[in-house]
Image (cartoon, helix red, strand yellow):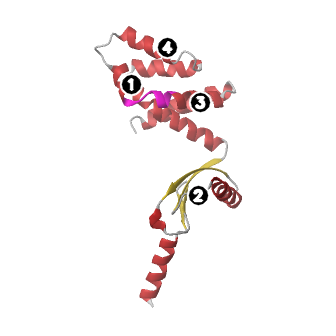
Amino acid sequence: MAGGSGARRYAEALLDIAAAERAVPAYRASLDALAGAFTPDVVRGLSDQRVPSERRRAAIEAATRSEPRAVRAVTSILQQRDRLEIVPDIARFFGELVDRREGIVKAKITTPIELASAQRDELVRDLERASGKTIRATFAVDPALIGGARVQVGDRLIDASLRTQLGELAREMASS
């Protein structure tokens, strides 16, 4: 992460402005789009001192013309400070702050096989019922799990995989 604390401060400031303008979803969409656009190659091009600064500034203005005013201002400041590489971090922190305010918790669910959409939805509903929180889940496949699932919710890991259960059984049997 290139600009952790700086990116977080920009995200917090933008969230305050977005909340005051009652435009949090629009700001989130804007930042997510810019995060995808500001790839390392693009940032290098916009930071290239061989390109006249007026031309680089004009490129930023053209690219952000339809974005919220505060987002345009931040990208302009970041360009002046040669810090455009933190735009993706700002977007990530902004999203995390919004999710936290809305009571949304991220979960990573790993299963040994790809789950059907209905199975994914049911698993997320079960987690939401058990936790009392809204869950935004991502799914991964790890055939080594054999069966069951491994669920990472925040910093808590729930490992209900068959592989782990078999390992625990083997340890119990070895200590008997």
First in sequence: mark 1 vs mark 2: 1
Amino acid under label 1? Val
Secondary structure beneath disc 2? loop
Name the residue: 55% across, 35% down. Answer: 94
- The Cα atoms of the two marked residues, 4 and 3, are separated by 18 Å
What residue do we see at 69% from left, 61% from top? Answer: 130
Name the amino acid, label 3: Ala
Q: Based on the displayed image, in which of its 4 quarters is residue 47 positioned?
A: top left
- Is there CB contact under 8 Å for labels 1 and 3? no
Q: Look at label 4 and name its amino acid.
A: Ala
Classify 10 Å Cα crowding around label 4: few (below 14), some (14-19), many (20 and above). few
Query: The residue under label 2 is which amino acid type?
Result: Leu
Q: In the rendered view, would you say 165 is above or below 129?
A: below
Drawn side of residue 164 relative to residue 1, left or right: right
Q: Is residue 37 magenta?
A: yes
Local SS, label 1: helix
Could you tell me how far apart the alpha carbons at marks 1 and 3 are, in whole angstroms? 19 Å
Q: Which residue is mark 3?
A: 29
Q: Main secondary structure of the magenta part?
A: helix
Q: Secondary structure at mark 4?
A: helix
Inspect the magenta stretch and tell me whether residue 116 lies in it.
no
Q: Which residue is mark 4?
A: 62
Q: Identify the residue at the far bottom of this view.
A: 176
Q: Residue 67 in the image: x percent, y percent?
A: 57, 20
Q: Earlier in the sequence, mark 2 or mark 4?
A: 4
Mark in front: 2 vs 4: 2
User: Mark 4 or 3 closer to N-term?
Assistant: 3
Q: Where does label 1 land, which residue?
A: 42
Give the total of numbered labels: 4
Where does the magenta region start and end? Answer: 34-40
Q: Is residue 32 above or below residue 139?
A: above
Label 2: which residue? 115
